[in-house]
């Protein structure tokens, strides 16, 4: 854009600056307005054609549609389409200039104001968090059911089964309390305290293996392999 803009402006030297600015503002406003109009109108067209319950559950509210519409920033595709015009295409330089103006308006104006818009709308989408809790609860229930079945096997130890059952039962109570299904009996606080304790121990282990690497007693590959295992153990604390 920087290489193309100067020769384009030189070819548009006969047009008043105010006219060019006015055209750029008008085209940018139309592009932004059309996207907003589309985002706000297409849900009603979809309702007329698709009345399935699954479709109804996926419908977005006005705040979500506004954020989606304001996120419609133009860039590489618009510029590639404009530059693909033949050199003798009528008003090619004006089209390229207006394309640059739209890219500038959408990337800079919309891009810089999007965080403010999200904050003003108090936009907090909890759908992913609810899905995460639902998935973790389902996995925990499956683990408890599997333990009940495996407890009758000859190769399982009673103390191991009891320990795992207590662990998964505690996880189930904590997840249900987080989801608001059960009243919190302090499981979340105990879990956070346990996570803090384990992370302190993991940090001590990391420092120990880094010290061995610095002393030349282990290689970088060994250190990184153990670090990955410690990182995996750390990530599993959130489950």
Image (cartoon, rainbow, N blue to C red):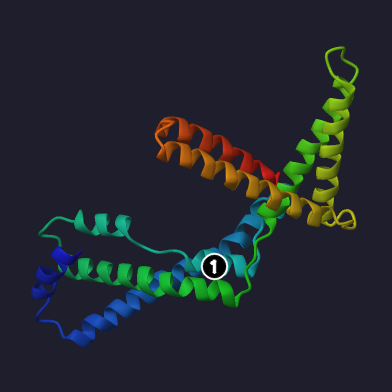
Question: Would you say residue 51 is visible in this rendering?
Answer: no
List the residue tagged with mark 1: 67
List x then y, in percent, for residue 209: 50, 38
Compared to residue 132, the image places residue 4 above or below, namely below
Residue at 68% across / 46% down in the picture?
198
Q: Is residue 133 left or right of residue 118?
A: right
Compared to residue 80, the image places residue 69 above or below, namely below
Q: Quadrant of the C terminus?
A: top right
Residue at 9% across / 69% down in the picture?
7
Q: In this view of the protein, which residue sits in the foreground, 216 or 234?
A: 216
List x then y, in percent, for residue 237: 68, 45
List x then y, in percent, for residue 91: 16, 68
Residue at 42% across / 69% down in the picture?
111
Instruction: State the image quarter where residue 144 is shown.
Output: top right
Q: Is residue 89 left or right of residue 229?
A: left
Q: Residue furthest top?
A: 154
């Amino acid at each position: 854009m920087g290489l193309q803009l100067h020769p384009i402006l030189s070819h548009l030297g006969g047009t008043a600056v105010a006219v060019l600015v006015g055209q750029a503002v008008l085209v940018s406003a139309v592009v932004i307005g059309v996207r907003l109009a589309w985002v706000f109108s297409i849900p009603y067209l979809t309702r007329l054609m698709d009345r399935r319950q699954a479709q109804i559950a996926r419908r977005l509210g006005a705040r979500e549609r506004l954020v989606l519409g304001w996120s419609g920033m133009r860039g590489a595709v618009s510029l590639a389409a404009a530059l693909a015009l033949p050199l003798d295409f009528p008003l090619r330089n004006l089209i390229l200039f207006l394309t640059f103006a739209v890219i500038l308006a959408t990337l800079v104006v919309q891009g810089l104001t999007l965080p403010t818009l999200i904050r003003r709308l108090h936009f907090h989408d909890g759908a992913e968090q609810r899905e995460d809790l639902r998935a973790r609860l389902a996995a925990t229930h499956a683990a408890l059911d599997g333990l009940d079945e495996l407890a009758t096997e000859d190769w399982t130890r009673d103390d191991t089964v009891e320990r795992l059952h207590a662990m998964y039962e505690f996880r189930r109570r904590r997840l249900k309390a987080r989801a608001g299904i059960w009243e919190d009996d302090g499981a979340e606080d105990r879990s956070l305290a346990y996570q803090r304790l384990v992370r302190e121990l993991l940090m001590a282990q990391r420092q120990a293996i880094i010290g061995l690497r610095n002393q030349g007693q282990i290689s970088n590959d060994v250190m990184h392999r153990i670090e990955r295992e410690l990182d995996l153990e750390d990530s599993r604390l959130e489950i």
